[in-house]
Amino acid sequence: MQSAGWDLAAAAAAVHPGVQLRRAGDTKFVFESYVAMKMFANFHRRDFNLSFLDEREFYDRRRFFEEFTELKAAPASAFLDARNARWGGFGKFLRAKYLSLVHARMETAFFGRLEQRGIVSAGPGFPESSWFADFAEMARRVWLLHCLFYAFDGGAEEDGASIFQVRAEERVVGFTVVPGFRVGRTMIQCRVYLSRPGRRP
């Protein structure tokens, strides 16, 4: 973003308005938070609240675990063939997350054109750039975590699984950088940015 000439402070303020950053370099935590918010949106739902994934509402724990086992064995690129009905859901998820996270202005600033966005929008293929490959790998890991989440305890709060973030309180917590997870008795802490001077993120 910096090499593209963006005003990082202004961009950070647009993501988390009113949060005072302690150091200029802390904008990286804001952008990490932005990516996490987009990628983990509706993570607590079996279908990510995406209508084209509604069949996942009927998956049982075994099906989620089988999907996790298959997908973790290969890179994301192995599952992006739109002709493969078994993995069509992941490709659609990747497409939706890219279009949600990478704004058209952002892509233009980074690459000078909207070629990748055009390919993603038109389908059924995907861009063959290394940048998109990295994005797809990030999406694969979120998908894997989602499968694992629902493979244990059903992934529902009443069954002992949940995703959470810390809300701002007395301006001590500025924002959640990465959400936390609870599955049964296992707790994965969330990461937060502490806005009060003298604290570390």
Image (tube, rainbow, N blue to C red):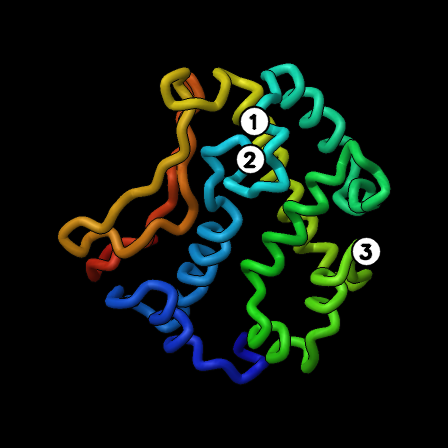
Q: Who comes first in sequence, dot 2 or dot 1?
A: 2
- Please report the residue visible at 39 percent of the width from the left and 18 percent of the height from the top: 160
Sort mark 3 into few (<14), some (14-19) or many (20+) by Cα contacts within 10 Å: some
Name which residue type carries label 3.
Gly
Q: Is mark 1 on a helix, strand or loop?
A: helix
Q: Is mark 3 on a helix, strand or loop?
A: loop
Left or right for 186, reference 100: left
Q: Mark 1 points at which residue?
A: 57
Cα–Cα gap, marks 3 and 1: 26 Å
Q: Which residue is drawn at 33% across and 63% down?
A: 16
Residue 76, x across and y down, in percent:
75, 44
* Residue 33 found in image quarter: bottom left
Could you tell me the amino acid type at mark 1? Glu
Q: Do the residues labelled 3 and 2 touch (CB within 8 Å)?
A: no
Number of numbered discs: 3
Confirm or deny contact between disc 2 and disc 1 (CB under 8 A).
Answer: yes
Q: Give the number of the disc on residue 47.
A: 2
**The quadrant where residue 106 appears:** bottom right
Q: Which of marks 3 and 1 is nearer the N terminus?
A: 1
